[in-house]
Image (cartoon, helix red, strand yellow):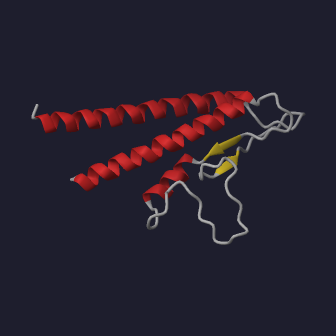
Amino acid sequence: MVGKVDDFMRFHEIALSVRGQRQQLLASNIANADTPNYKARDIDFGAVMNAALHKNGNQDAATLIKTTATHLDSKNGSGVATQYRNNDQANVDGNTVDMDVERNQFAENSLRYEASLTILNMQIRNMLSAIQGQ
């Protein structure tokens, strides 16, 4: 029972952490919408969570595996791999930020972050209720 609760909490801890980092990247994209040659970045949430579910040993699920010393660290310093967003059409100044896409992704990520917090709070309330015998 304790193992399941621990796995549940760890999953949501990783999910909230990745969602928070993704929110920062999306906000950065929006803030740099008028910056020449800025390339929009994002995190592949599904890939990071898949890695978290299938992690090996004691390695943190949100870190990249370096197979050689010549590999570079991730640019955001968080260990989560960021990717450049593919868009159909870049601006004349080389900026790849599409404000409609960024706003939609920002809103969706916010909703999913709040949903994870709500689920986590409900689980903790249920555990407290069971402990107190209510």
Between 91 and 2, the one lying in front of the other is 2
Question: In the rendered view, does 31 fall on the left or right side of 131?
Answer: right
The residue located at (75%, 41%) in the rendering is 87
Where is residue 6? Give x, y as percent: 31, 51
Where is residue 81? Give x, y as percent: 63, 52
Question: In the rendered view, does 62 fall on the left or right side of 66?
Answer: left
Quarter of the view holding residue 26:
top right
Between 3 and 54, the one lying in front of the other is 3
Is residue 58 placed above or below 50 in the rendered structure?
below
Q: Quadrant of the C terminus?
A: top left
Where is residue 23? Give x, y as percent: 58, 35
Give the total of numbered labels: 0
Question: In the rendered view, does 134 fall on the left or right side of 1?
Answer: left
Q: Please, which residue is most extreme toward the bottom here?
A: 68
The residue located at (15%, 38%) in the rendering is 131
Q: Please, which residue is most extreme toward the right here?
A: 92
The residue located at (59%, 30%) in the rendering is 106
Between 92 and 27, the one lying in front of the other is 27
Where is residue 5? Give x, y as percent: 28, 49
Quarter of the view holding residue 121:
top left
Is residue 89 placed above or below 73 in the rendered structure?
above
The residue located at (66%, 47%) in the rendering is 76
